[in-house]
Image (cartoon, rainbow, N blue to C red):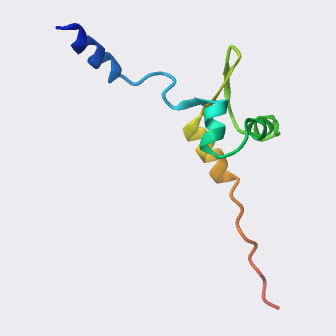
């Protein structure tokens, strides 16, 4: 097996942090400032995150669900 085969085989494996983004790149993905994302993290039912050292990591599938659950639906009008 050559060195190239080993590198290719290793790069196909899922990595532990594949579904995570740092705060800055996540803010860019949702078109918000990092400061806004930090406010979301600090809310009582805020955006879930993990911290590894000084890094704030956001699990993208969980963030997607959190944003979806924040969706507002119009109130149904009652007929009089």
Percent x, y of residue 62: 60, 39
Looking at the figure, which quarter contains the N terminus?
A: top left
63 left or right of 44?
Answer: left
Percent x, y of residue 2: 19, 8
Residue drawn at 27 percent across, 19 percent down: 8
49 left or right of 16?
Answer: right
34 left or right of 68?
Answer: right
Q: Quadrant of residue 51?
A: top right
The answer to whether residue 67 is above or below residue 10 is below
59 left or right of 71?
Answer: left
Residue drawn at 77 percent across, 34 percent down: 38
Percent x, y of residue 64: 59, 45
Residue drawn at 59 percent across, 42 percent down: 29
Percent x, y of residue 45: 77, 41
Residue drawn at 40 percent across, 25 percent down: 14
Q: Quadrant of residue 63?
A: top right
Label tally: 0
Q: Looking at this view, is 28 or 39 the one in front?
A: 28
Check the image and name the residue furthest to the left.
Answer: 1
Q: Quadrant of residue 27?
A: top right
Check the image and name the residue furthest to the bottom.
Answer: 80
Looking at the figure, which quarter contains the C terminus?
A: bottom right
């Amino acid at each position: 097996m050559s060195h190239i085969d080993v590198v290719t085989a290793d790069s196909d494996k899922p990595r532990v942090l594949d579904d995570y983004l740092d705060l800055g790149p996540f803010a860019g993905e949702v078109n918000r400032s990092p400061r806004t994302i930090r406010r979301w993290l600090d809310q009582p039912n805020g955006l879930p995150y993990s911290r590894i050292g000084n890094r704030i990591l956001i699990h993208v599938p969980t963030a997607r669900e959190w944003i979806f659950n924040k969706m507002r639906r119009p109130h149904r009008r009652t007929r009089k």
